[in-house]
Amino acid sequence: MSAAPLLSVENLDIAMRLPDGGRLPIVKDFSLTLQAGDTLGIVGESGSGKSLLSLAVMGLLPPAAIASGRILLEGRDLMALDDDGMSRVRGRRIGMIFQEPMTALNPAMTVGDQIAEGLVRHEKLSWKAAREAAVDLLDRVRIPDPRARAKAYPHQMSGGQRQRVGIAIAVAMRPALMIADEPTTALDVTVQAEVLEILDDLCAREGMALMLISHDLGVIARMCARTLVLYAGRRMEEGDTRGVLTEPLNPYTRGLLRAVPRRRVDGAPLDTIPGTVPGFARLPEGCVFSDRCGDVVAACRAGEPAWTQPRPNRGVRCIRAQQEMPA
Amino acid sequence: MTALLLRRSASLFLTLLAVSGLIFLVMQVLPGDPAAIMLGTSASPETLAALRHELGLDQPMLVRYLAWIGGLATGDLGTSTTYGVPVSGLIGERLAVTLPLALMAIGLSIAIALPLGVLSAARRNGPADYIAGFISQLFIAVPGFWVGLLLALVFAVKLGVMPSGGFPGWQTGFWPALQALVLPAIALALPQAGVLTRVTRSSVAEVLGEDFVRTARAKGLPKRAALWRHAVRNALVPVVTILGLQFTFLIAGAVLVENVFNLPGLGRLAYQALTQRDLVVMQDVVMFFAGLVILMNFLVDMSYLLLDPRLREAGR
Amino acid sequence: MTAPASSTPLPTARRKSPGLRLATRPNLVIGGALVAFLLGIALVSLVWTPLPPTKMQIALKLKAPLEKGLFGTDHLGRDVASMLMAGAWNSLSIAVSAVALGAAVGTALGVTVAAKRGLFEAVAMRANDVIFAFPPILSAMMLGALMGTGRGTAIIAIATFMVPVFARVTAGAASQVWARDFILAARSAGKGVTRITIEHVLPNIANQIIVQVAIQLGLAILTEAGLSFLGLGMAPPAPTWGRMLADSQTYLGTAPWLALMPGLAIALTVFGFNMLGDGLRDLLDPREKGRT
């Protein structure tokens, strides 16, 4: 490793302040490293804290959230920056695409201006030049007739088109890191593939690193070289995508994989993980997955398992992982 | 959009018609004989009959109503019984005081309420929010005409830097006339500003929670820019709505404040018409005020089209 | 997954004791205390005031506060404190009567609109818009010119303006109740519209009406003060806060306390009712919290 990695998150904890003054821990002991141009997928069920994680990197946590630990971008601690400093990072070094294209755009501003706005502020472009650049960006996210569409308002566009506008806003300033939080969840299946392709294409061409957050293992398998599995705010498993998907070390990952719908020859019913994600206030003792885990043993409830690295570039949080490893 | 405009205009026209009917009913039909009210109990039958003829009260009801609204449409509002001059001229003269006063008050209330409400929303539950909340509650609770009295007490009586009342007329020069309107405008503006601050706060606070504000922040806009460029603009519809609804109270306030400061405006004209039992002036001024309120709400309706592009297509 | 914090069930807040719940609602406590205090003063004024509020002592005119009486005397030597107390009763009684009248008519109109809909709704709501175009001061002037000024005119003028306000609030709230399942059940049980309105709709919108009553009382006090300031309120010599202010204008330079005290009384009363309304809204109608 020659220079500092693009993004490195170290021992991040995020808790929510409760109305009664207490604190509810959500994300615990979270670390990750991302090199320039890397693609990392973070997979987890809804309520696993994955959105909070992306907002923490953006420095856009809700006021009730308290974060501790370090988030380093190109060696610089983002959590030490004030809002002005962070504003110079957002958009320019890190771009973000949000889940809901219906609500993520300002209804009272043309999409062209929403794309141009960041360029005017940060690249000191004139509005005329920035609007021109916005037309070009709309073209690159494959919006037909971009010059005319730049003058459209969000409500005049379909969900898929709006999400492409969202991508155009995020890539406008060629950030080094792109965070996409469930970018296709709200879209029709047919539109999903095209939006993913645009995103993939842009990342590859611009050399952007991608942090893709999704509940959908299929999306992550298609887009990301590395995969991190999140459960109840904890890393459960991490590794190259192929390894995680073909040789899962954590019973939770195996459960997720069994729950992925695929063509079955035997017509057997789809497996599900029993139970639901527990609320953060009612996590079980010991391993957070112990109450739903099929492989649970008494030791699982004794204490929360530590993060271990059984192989280079592979991490897991499970005391039984060593036993599960094929020899 | 044109169809929408036409529909709204038709509705405006119908409302105005209904209002004129109601006023006519209350002023001309309910009292039985308006002439008797105007002259009082001691009038001789001859003078009563003369006035009845002069006012056209010997005509059938419908003819009188049509004559009145016909006059409204053409600007002929009849003749004041006490002043002996055309009412339209009287109203025009008084409007030169009331209209600038109302506009100054509206401008001032926006200038106070918008920053205060936005600040309050941006620092929700912080000390600034509580202070702004207290100030707006205070503004809402104090009667505007009392504020006028206090302002006159401090700036005119004690400090002597402002006129305590009266109006020199625009022909004496712009500044002396404007100066005479400053204290009344403040008195009129504060209660409005209180209500407006509260609405601005809740509306901006709601919009600040929207996803698109986060998108704006994610592209690197600092808090302040995201607030003003994205949140405030989208929060304006309820603010403008209240501004329109508050117009009724602005007019009520103008009647009072004009009396405090002895300003020859429309409100004072209405008050004088009451004390002098000049029903002709009364009827016209009330119609004028009510029409103004309705017109204001119509304009507010129309302004939504400017503020929210989504609505523009609705009527297409 | 846009808002993990809210999608995660948080631990339910511990049930608080009623006393603690009250202490965390300063609006309700301050507003309630102020209103209770003023109501008390108004009631006491009926049986006792330091001096008869209409008693003139010209020799003792325009005395400063504490020089004669708690708040001094006016231009006719009347005791300001006594006049303020009697004025509290006059103001509150007019405001309460007007709001009661306006709320009764407006609510009746509102629930009927919600029950009938269709053409009746269109006509009633348009009529509301028309009435709403008349500020109470204007209608009081119109009515005053016709039937003379006084307590009755003031009450009718204020109540008229309250009707559309209450009609709108109740029509909206009642329509929501009508859309709920238990109404369907009541209808299929063969209950008529009137019975459903009385048995099911009204109890379910009572909270919203109560909140609105508190808020409109503040507005009614303000309006009554304005009317009596213009001489459109209760006839003299009955003391009203508004007329005390009107009288004070002549003596602004020499006796400023005459302008100060009645205004403070009005502001305090309106403030009290507004706080009470806000507090009640938070307590009874949590959906509306933070709205104005």
Image (tube, coloured by chain):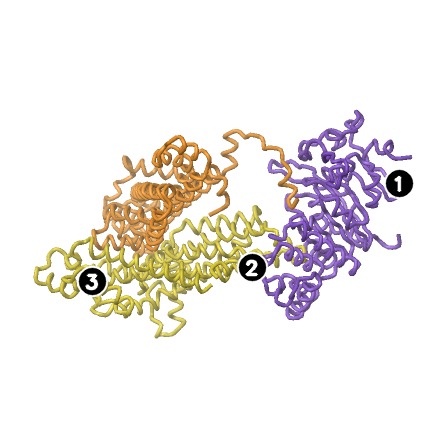
Residue C166 in view? no
SS label for mark 1? strand
**Chain ID for label 2?**
A
Tell me whether circle 3 and circle 2 mark residues in contact (CB < 8 Å).
Answer: no
Q: Quadrant of residue B225?
A: bottom right
Q: CA distance from mark 3 to mark 2?
A: 50 Å
- B3 vs C93: above or below: below
Q: Nearer the viewer, residue B167 or C188?
A: C188
**Callout 2: 10 Å neighbours few (<14), some, many (20+)?**
some
Q: Amino acid at mark 3?
A: Arg
The residue lying toward the viewer, choosing from A175 and A327, is: A327
Tag 2, which secondary structure? loop
Tell me, what hue is chain B?
yellow
Residue B205 horizontal side relative to residue A289, left or right: left
The chain displayed purple equals A
Q: Read off the chain for label 3.
A: B
Residue B215, visible in the rendered structure: yes
Observer-nearest of A197 and C28: A197
Residue at mark 3 to residue at mark 1: CA–CA distance: 99 Å
Compared with residue B245, is residue C20 higher up or lower down, i.e. above or below? Answer: above
The chain that appears orange in the image is C
**Mark identifier at residue B64:** 3
